[in-house]
Image (tube, rainbow, N blue to C red):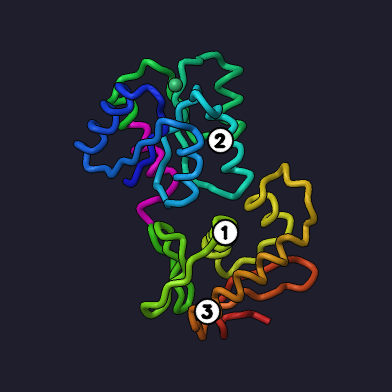
Amino acid sequence: MRILLVEDESKLARSLARGLQEEGHTVDCCERGQDGFEQAEATPYDVVVLDWMLPDMDGLAILRQWRSRGLQVPVLMLTARGSVSERVLGLRAGADDYLVKPFAFDELLARLDALQRRCGLSQAVRQVGDVVLDTRKRALARDGREVALSAREYSLALQLFEHAGEVLTRTELLSRVWGSQFDGEPNVVDVYIGYLRKKLADTGTTSAQVRTVRGIGYRLEVQGDSQT
Ligand code: CA
């Protein structure tokens, strides 16, 4: 797995990074929240291990911003806070798991393995027609040509690829990609479908297309497979 570790206690960070590397993982470390925030947006990680208490930026605030910007990387939060209400706060903000300090390294490993299984990271590519969605690179690919996607485009593409052949309503796409707290214009979905169609076209695909299902939503399908 490619792991981002955001932890300001250097000694702990070093020992965790060393342990994870010994297990065969690739680890990048950030000691400052701001650096970690930007790093996760710039690089596709399989999982982020995020400390709650950081000197410059609160881990919870970082997590909320990632989620509101459409970044869906699995996040395991580390914290010295163990109360139920704080745990709930972390999970509500979009954390996928939670570990209270001090913890045993083996428990961290076990939880990261479980996260990987749960999030299906072993399935790094999804194919529809002649187009592949590369979930590690967050890109569309066809015949050696690669088209990069923004975080939001990727998140939308992932929904459509995972539910290829099914109709997804605007409401479903809005809540899964923009979050249930989104309070902007719902037509943002249509705007991003437009961006995604353009990028699909950039791959030169002849088969995969996003079809408008009038009055309902959208369906990613292989041309020729549509029922009506
Ligand atoms: Ca800390």
Comes first in the chain, label 2 or label 1: 2
Q: Quadrant of the C terminus?
A: bottom right
Q: Residue furthest left?
A: 22
Q: Where does residue 137 sit, x and y in percent of width and height?
A: 41, 60
Examine the rendered structure and indicate whether residue 34 appears above or below residue 223: above
> Which region is colored magenta?
110-123
Which residue is drawn at the image coordinates 42% and 39% (left, top)? 48
Comes first in the chain, label 2 or label 3: 2
Question: In 3D space, how far apart are the residues under numbered discs 2 and 1 (Cα atoms)?
Answer: 23 Å
Q: Kindly identify the amino acid type of the residue bearing the numbered disc 3.
A: Asp
Q: Kindly identify the amino acid type of the residue bearing the numbered disc 2.
A: Ile
Which residue is drawn at the image coordinates 44% and 70% (left, top)? 132
Q: Kindly identify the amino acid type of the residue bearing the numbered disc 1.
A: Gln
| 117 inside magenta stretch | yes
The numbered disc on residue 62 is 2
From the image, tell me which residue sits under label 1. Answer: 159
